[in-house]
Amino acid sequence: MGKYILRRLVMCVIVVFVAAIIIFTIMYFVPGDPVEIMLGSTATVEQKDALRASLGLDQPFLIQLGTYLLNLLQGDFGTSYTYNAPVTNELLSRLPYTLLIGISGIIVDVIISIPLGIYAALRRGKWQDTACTVFAMACVSVPDFWFALMLVVIFAVNLQVLPVSGIGGPRYFVMPIAASALAGIGGLLRQTRSGMLDVMNSDFVVTARSKGVPEGKVILQHMLPNALIPVVTVVGGHFSRCIGGAVIIEQIFSIPGLGAYMLNAINTRDYPVIRSSVVILAAVTSIVMLVVDIVYALIDPRIKAQYSGK
């Protein structure tokens, strides 16, 4: 198992560097000039050339790429064109807010979806199953940004029980977390229900019941562990979706997270910020996928034995 984890960590590093090369290449060849945005249309050609040289933008592509990768290996993400400050400091201050929303959203998904999915599977074909299915479809169908705006209108504007935006305490994150978790609730509920139905009539479940094992124990110790493997996959994928979708959520609720930081950088062509944000997101996603594989092994001993044999 240790060798497998080490191999996956090496793979994560490779994925991050590949992502860094791809985003650098895209930003290099994309139309537009950040110098034009920084200095404006009134700047002279000499001023633009001087700034371009100071930023290293006058160098050939391969030299710029090599310099960028070398700095990345040293933990240097560069200096923001817009804020004229080290990108690393901004990332370290903003990333916790994005991770807080993403991780909290996943926790809300799990707490709500897995019990409802189990309940719907055990009541298959009954009105409870139909109600859970309709609820799941509604969660999947409603756009995140619309739901976030409705939360603001209802709870912040009309009822005035939650703050509209900003950060300042747990109450400020209730609506962002709810908006982030919405779509995941529907997908995770449906996957849990499907997984439970797949194992409900399996031989090991029938055998456990024939031996007189209590129904609660059959569900928790025999059915649920086998049904959770595809559920874990959905959870890992939704975490990546939460991190990527934080751009909209953070903009709506004025949260100074990584998403809002990256969106502003895109608008101003702040290349160091864009590249660094993508690299960080790639690293976080790779680590989440590694955690998902480790959870597989904890749930299913056969997978753990397979990993240990490598």
Image (spheres, helix red, strand yellow):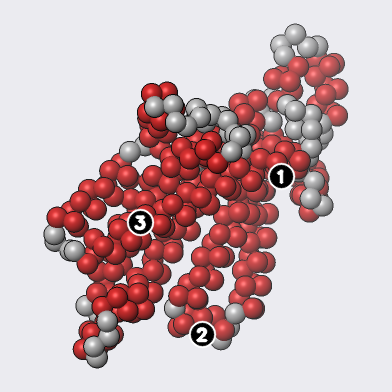
Q: Is residue 98 visible?
A: yes
The residue identified by callout 2 is 305
Quadrant assignment for the C terminus: bottom right
- Residue 51, given in percent of the width and then of the height, sits at 83, 24
The residue identified by callout 3 is 113
Between label 2 and label 1, give the one nearer the viewer: 1
Residue drawn at x 64%, y 44% is: 95
Q: Residues within 10 Å of mark 3 (few under 14, many from 20)?
A: many
Residue drawn at x 41%, y 53% is: 109
Kind of residue indicated by mark 3 = Ser
Tags 2 and 1 touching, CB below 8 Å: no
3 or 2: tag closer to the N-terminus? 3
Q: Nearer the viewer, residue 59 or 294?
A: 294
**Quarter residue 121 falls in:** bottom left
Q: Is residue 17 above or below residue 42?
A: below
Q: Nearer the viewer, residue 118 or 291?
A: 118
Q: Secondary structure at mark 1?
A: helix
Question: In this view, which residue lies farthest toward the left?
Answer: 126
